[in-house]
Image (tube, rainbow, N blue to C red):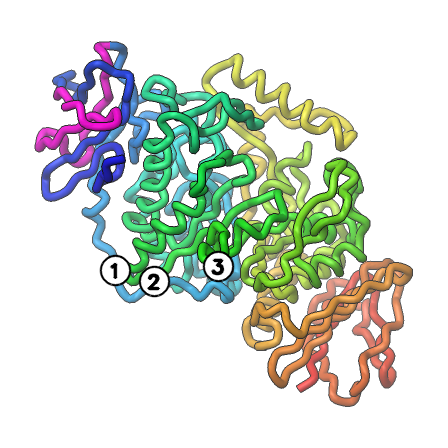
Amino acid sequence: MKVIVNRPGVTLNSGEADVWVWAPKAKKAAIQLLPSNHELPLTKAQYGYWHIKTTELKDGALYKIILDDKDPLPDPASVYQPEGVHGPSAAVDLNAFEWTDNTWNNVDLPSYLLYELHTGTFSPNGDFAGIESKLDYLVSLGITAIEIMPVAQFPGKRNWGYDGVFPYAVQNSYGGPKALQHLVNACHQKGLAVVLDVVYNHLGPEGNYFNEYGPYFTDKYNTPWGNAVNFDDAGSDAVRHYFIESVLMWFRDFHIDALRMDAVHAIKDFSPNHILAEIKAKVDELMTATGKRHYLIVECDLNDVRFINPLDKAGFGIDSQWIDEFHHALRITAGGEQTGYYSDFNGIADLAKSYNDAYVYDGQYSPHRDKRFGIKATDNTGEQFIVFSQNHDQVGNRMLGERSSELFSTEMQKLMAGAVLTAPYLPMLFMGEEYSEPNRFMYFVSHTDPELAEAVRKGRKEEFAAFHAQGEAPDPMAEDTFDNSKLQWNLIAQQPHQTMLAYYQSLIALRKSLPVLHQTSRKGLHAEANEEQQTLLLHRNYHMQEAIIMMNFSSNTQSVTLPAGATQWHLQFNSAGTAWQNKPSNTPAQSGGTIVNLQPESFIIYINE
């Protein structure tokens, strides 16, 4: 296939617009300039592309695409939809922004400490400027990378982002592309990396005009969202090019540091060169050309190291992946309900296995899946896995959207944070957990199609059948559902939230300052569970430093024995310490020689130099 230098859509450069449209079945194509309705005919090129170079399309100009004299359509590669998914596209000069981050070159991946946030509910403004206003707060917390849920244009103003229908366009209600560039630049000035969540496994239903252009989808495979994106069927060369150029655009034109690709297990591609491997190869080429580092992160439900193994070892070369199994085991250990996909997890023994082996299921039989599942990840390093005690999925996909702050005691919340932040993997927080935000994070949309809105309501109800949830799911279309999911920033100055925030700050600072906790090597690591006591001992070694993290998930004080050499163990952190208590009656754990009395729902970190 002919290599196209510029990405699909409109690229502005030195006052000239370079326009590429893929419409292989069209007999004629044109750009319609708005509001004049003046049409610029496109010239047919190879492989179904249409092309024009023109000076009539300026920065900010509105336009649509006309195929075979039919109704005008938005550009599927639009970078801005100022009037929403059904409105005209806008040409944007992405090269016009004056970047001041020339010396920035991304945070080392092992040093990523991620903070997942949703733009619309993170701040009162619900936009990129609102995120920017909180960057100093995130830096003081100890975060090194913010992970922004999808910003691709979706219907209306309220959406998680996974219903986006313009993978190149930046949501208008968040501020559009130039505001995103401004945010990324500001993050880099503060020393923060930016991870953007992108969705390449499906496209949303409302405003989806892709079928009008060409075979972007294939009926060879089915996904939870319908026909799969066409990555290996007839016409797939152009579809692959479309998504590869989207990846490169975020890195090159928006200076995004890493992409988190949603549910890549739903990407169906049986071609010899998997689309993820091709994306990785193209990103490597970009990094060689620019000297800048970028990472690729995936959400993957397959426990298959092929995704994260390097290209030269027959892998897809992805840098890191979310590991839901750590979360599932942790939640069951903490006392969460063992329903739905949680039914596969038996608590503290599985949590210890996740520390030791990354994947809980690495070849054994899975009752929930009714098959043997997974493969061992023996040779994969810690930074290739991202762990968390909650995220947008695990909170918002509950029927009522309850956070850990509502489901678990304060002490258990602190213990869960300790389990994540002492792991040899990359830790991720979900916005607000660091001060125990009580507002729920619920599922919300703002579809304009009444039938579609009702289908979403019905789908939410059906989704919870396996969980046997009680009551009615909040109406995802209601504006109150969205408003009640916003963070309450006034709480960080009030108790007990102020103490919880200080707790997270101290624990994060300790992880960053102690080499044995900061490094992500899985060598010298061993986790051992005592199911009767509900305690877990996590040993970590690094050069001359050794750590033991003693966790008690039970509601009773447990006596735990320190390893040999107890006289050399020095207490570094105690989640039951007086500094973190709002109840003066709680006392720190006491050590009697080699015996430690571990308080209920608490953990202790000892260091042996």
Is mark 2 in CB contact (under 8 Å) with mark 1?
Answer: yes
Span colored in magenta: 40-69
388 lies above or below 42: below
In the rendered structure, the answer to whether residue 99 lies left or right of residue 429 reads left
Q: Nearer the viewer, mark 3 or mark 1?
A: 1
Comes first in the chain, label 3 or label 1? 1
**Displayed quadrant of residue 529:** bottom right
Answer yes or no: is residue 231 visible: yes
In the rendered structure, the answer to whether residue 550 lies left or right of residue 525 reads right
**Displayed quadrant of residue 10:** top left
Rendered image: mark on residue 138: 3
In the rendered structure, the answer to whether residue 284 lies left or right of residue 346 reads left
Nearer-the-camera pick, 464 or 519: 519
Q: What's the residue at 19%, 47% (across, down)?
A: 96
Q: Is 96 a magenta residue? A: no
**How packed is label 1: few (under 14 Cα within 10 Å), some, or many (20 or more)?**
few
Which part of the image, by quadrant, shows the C terminus? bottom right
Nearer-the-camera pick, 512 or 264: 264
596 lies above or below 51: below
Residue on which disc 2 sits: 189
CA distance for labels 2 and 3: 13 Å
